[in-house]
Amino acid sequence: MKTFSQRQAVGPRGAYRFLMKCKGRAAAVGVMFLGAMACATPKGHAPTPEDKVVVSSGSSATPGEATPGLEAALKQSVGTELLGGNRVSLAENGAVFDTVLDEVKRARSSIHVVIFIWRPCIVGQALADAIAAKAKEGVACRIVVDPAGSHGFEDPLGKQLTAAGCEVHEYKPLTESTPGEYLERNHRKIVVVDGKVAITGGFGIWKSWMGNGREREEWRDSNIRLEGPAVRKLQEAFAQNWKASGGSPLPDDVFPRIPAAGETRAAVVSSTAPQDTQSLSAAERMARALVTSARKRLWIANSYFVPSDELIQLIAEKARAGVDVRVLAPGPVHDWKSIRAAQRDTYKPLLEAGVRIYEYQPTMMHAKTMLVDDRWVAVGSTNLDPLSSKQMEEDTVVLEDRALAAQQEKDFLQDITYSKRIDKSEAGILEKISRSFFWWMGKSL
């Protein structure tokens, strides 16, 4: 497997190039037409016996109850468990760059980065400078970037990092991918320092994530800094992508024993494309577990809100049972017009069930969070769309932390003051075809 120092920069081609064209309004119509030809329906996966712990965990929910079932669902259906002894803090919007740079500058043994978007810009260069300086001090610096998202990374950033002694790899280079692999991108955003501290969330290393999330060119996003035993699971997610990208096995010292740092319990859900796209991915199982466990409140903020029919039904059932269900999605400022059209096709059954839906107005709302009742928060890279569910590498941290939940509540309520409430669905045939197309693509390509 070639590294950046051995490879010429390449651009997307084939299916991915076509998909990228869908970002324009006119091309979105073409996508919708193809969706009609595909005759697809946005179904995810019918429940099977192995889903029973997830599907049944919230079937008899009543408001105000404690939240049983989520821990069991995460362990039995998702395959991950809650680890105690963690400390977590939010690093929202542009604050994530201060957090990442602070941790990089403190590094003593290793810096690991896996990222979908890292492009030349002020913050991209600042991070490259900081990591290169650490590499020259003898810190082991290993980096995996996705070539589809990291346009222009190789020169000058990749070359600078390689020259400083960092090992840099592409994840599934587009020139070496089969057509069926073009959409299997690495959408994770993970930085792990010394195996003890991690930053993850929805951020990219690009100018769009600078600022406070209230101006048009400054996206709204949510991220966390995590310290404690759960960091090992994010390190393992990095190791998986490192090996898949051609990296050598990591040494034992990057997995140190991590003492307790706080009282937060955390479960890391690392999702990858299932072998059979008709099966549920870990990301889908996690979403179902979070939704079905809600007893009092389910507040969802998601940048590409195009859930399957089955997940929409589960969300609607919660609202009908009296759970306070709210959805915050992007509004008129969106980087994928065709996905916003697909998003709007989900509104009607949710509104009819009593779900309150808001569209964020100032800029692109890029967060991927869930607030469940008064103690559960999910933050990560995972969107509720078919590509995230069926094709991409993703990570989300599910946290049991009442203080964090209170802060998430405050932030959500503030965000909706910058949002427009949607009272009725105005989706038509184009929105329906767009959503059908994306689900066909996620399950078929």
Image (cartoon, rainbow, N blue to C red):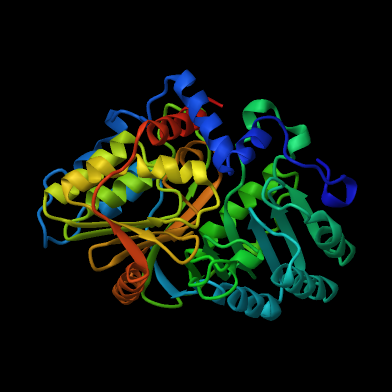
Asked whether residue 57 appears in the rendered view, the answer is: no
Depth check: give the residue in front, 412 or 127. Answer: 412
How far from the left and from the top, in percent, is residue 284? 39, 42
Depth check: give the residue in front, 444 or 101. Answer: 444
How far from the left and from the top, in percent, is residue 199? 55, 67
Which residue is painted at 45% across and 34% down in the image? 434
State the quadrant of the C terminus.
Answer: top right
In the drawing, does residue 7 fall left or right of residue 99? right
How far from the left and from the top, in percent, is residue 219? 53, 65
In the drawing, does residue 426 fall left or right of residue 101? left
- In the figure, 98 relative to 219: above or below? below
Asked whether residue 380 appears in the rendered view, the answer is: yes
Which residue is painted at 78% across and 35% down in the image? 175
State the quadrant of the N terminus.
Answer: top right
Depth check: give the residue in front, 2 or 217. Answer: 217
How far from the left and from the top, in percent, is residue 36? 45, 22
Which residue is painted at 37% across and 26% down in the image? 41
Depth check: give the residue in front, 206 or 336. Answer: 336
